[in-house]
Image (tube, rainbow, N blue to C red):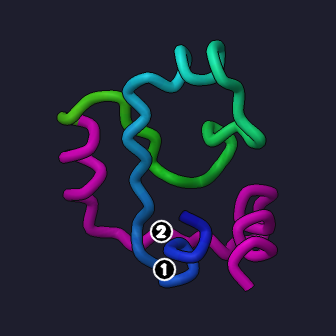
Amino acid sequence: MFDYAGTGRRVVLFTYDLDEYIRDRGMYMDVRELPFDICRTADEVAEALGKDERPDYTSKSRKGTMISRCTS
């Protein structure tokens, strides 16, 4: 996902089972802290994919800085 974020295109994460996954398996990083669209339903995925604006994953925000480090 970080390599793809470097293209400047929208990253959409379909995390319908995120709470269960974190509870049962854990994660190295909390994807909820990433600047990507987090979707739990098919309707949310469709809405996220329908957005016209391009995301800015390289901004000076904490999240943007993390993305810049991971994709440069």
Residue 61 lies in what quarter of the image?
bottom right
Residue located farthest toward the front when viewing the structure as drawn: 25
The residue depicted at 26 percent of the width and 44 percent of the height is 45
Image coordinates of residue 38 in percent, x first then y, are 46, 40
Three-letter amino acid code of the residue under disc 1: Gly
Three-letter amino acid code of the residue under disc 2: Pro
Quadrant of the drawing holding the N terminus: bottom right
Residue 46 located within the stretch drawn in magenta: yes
The residue depicted at 78 percent of the width and 64 percent of the height is 66
Image coordinates of residue 16 in percent, x first then y, are 38, 27
Residue 53 lies in what quarter of the image?
bottom left
Residue count near mark 1 (Cα–Cα under 10 Å), binned few <14, some 14–19, many ≥20: few
User: In the drawing, does residue 22 fall left or right of residue 9?
Assistant: right
The residue depicted at 62 percent of the width and 37 percent of the height is 32
Tell me if residue 65 comes above or below residue 71 in the rendering: above
Residue count near mark 2 (Cα–Cα under 10 Å), binned few <14, some 14–19, many ≥20: some
Tell me if residue 33 comes above or below residue 1 in the rendering: above
Residue 45 located within the stretch drawn in magenta: yes
Q: Which residues are magenta?
A: 44-72
Q: Which residue is mark 1?
A: 8
Residue 30 lies in what quarter of the image?
top right
Q: Which residue is mark 2?
A: 55
Residue depth check, mark 2 versus mark 1: number of the one nearer the observer: 1
Q: How many marks?
A: 2
Which residue is nearer to you in this view: 59 or 44?
44
